[in-house]
Image (tube, rainbow, N blue to C red):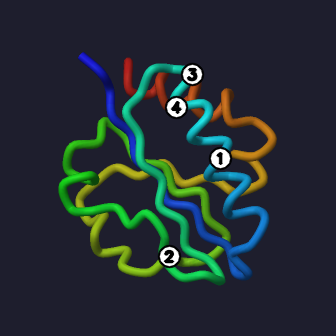
């Protein structure tokens, strides 16, 4: 059974770091065999918006953020792994390792 993950990336300017983090997450998720969807919130607005269904079906959710994202109520009642954009960009495999270890306990 394929695992599913979703992520939301957002920073104040919504330029390079938002998209660098999103790309890092997408590459890592693909390498680990996950189905994935990554929403970005930045200077060009919300892209690839996560639906309620995307969020409900996810085995885990990552928020790689430097600001409070829009529509946070979508995630109410869900466990969200919140990390900094720089941490995702510099050590995405370590973040995924930590999440997977947590989920397997």
Helix, strand or loop at mark 3:
helix
Instruction: Say which quarter of the image contains residue 84.
Output: bottom right
Label 2 and label 1: CA atoms lie apart by: 18 Å
* Residue 6, position as x, y percentages in the image: 40, 47
* Residue 67, position as x, y percentages in the image: 62, 76
Label at residue 23? 1
Contact (CB < 8 A) between labels 3 and 4? Answer: yes
Helix, strand or loop at mark 1:
helix
> Which of labels 2 and 1 is toward the front?
1
- 3 left or right of 86 in image: left
Contact (CB < 8 A) between labels 1 and 4? Answer: no
The N terminus sits in image quarter: top left
Near mark 2 (Cα within 10 A), the count class, few <14, some 14-19 or many ≥20, is: some
Name the residue that disc number 2 marks. 69
Name the residue that disc number 3 marks. 31
Q: Residue at x 52, y 31 (%)?
A: 29
Contact (CB < 8 A) between labels 4 and 2? Answer: no
Return the disc, 1 or 3, that comes first in the chain's sequence.
1
Name the residue that disc number 4 marks. 29
Contact (CB < 8 A) between labels 2 and 3? Answer: no
Helix, strand or loop at mark 2:
loop
Return the disc, 1 or 4, that comes first in the chain's sequence.
1
Q: Residue at x 18, y 55 (%)?
A: 53
The C terminus sits in image quarter: top left
Return the disc, 2 or 1, that comes first in the chain's sequence.
1
């Amino acid at each position: 059974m394929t695992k599913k993950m979703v992520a939301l990336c957002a920073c104040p300017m919504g330029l390079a770091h938002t998209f660098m983090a999103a790309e890092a997450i997408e590459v890592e998720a693909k390498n680990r065999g996950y189905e994935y969807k990554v929403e970005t919130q930045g200077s060009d607005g919300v892209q690839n918006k996560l639906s309620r269904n995307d969020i409900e079906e996810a085995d885990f959710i990552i928020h790689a953020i430097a600001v409070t994202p829009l529509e946070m109520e979508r995630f109410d009642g869900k466990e969200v792994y919140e990390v900094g954009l720089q941490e995702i960009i510099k050590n995405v495999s370590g973040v995924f390792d930590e999440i997977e270890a947590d989920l397997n306990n």
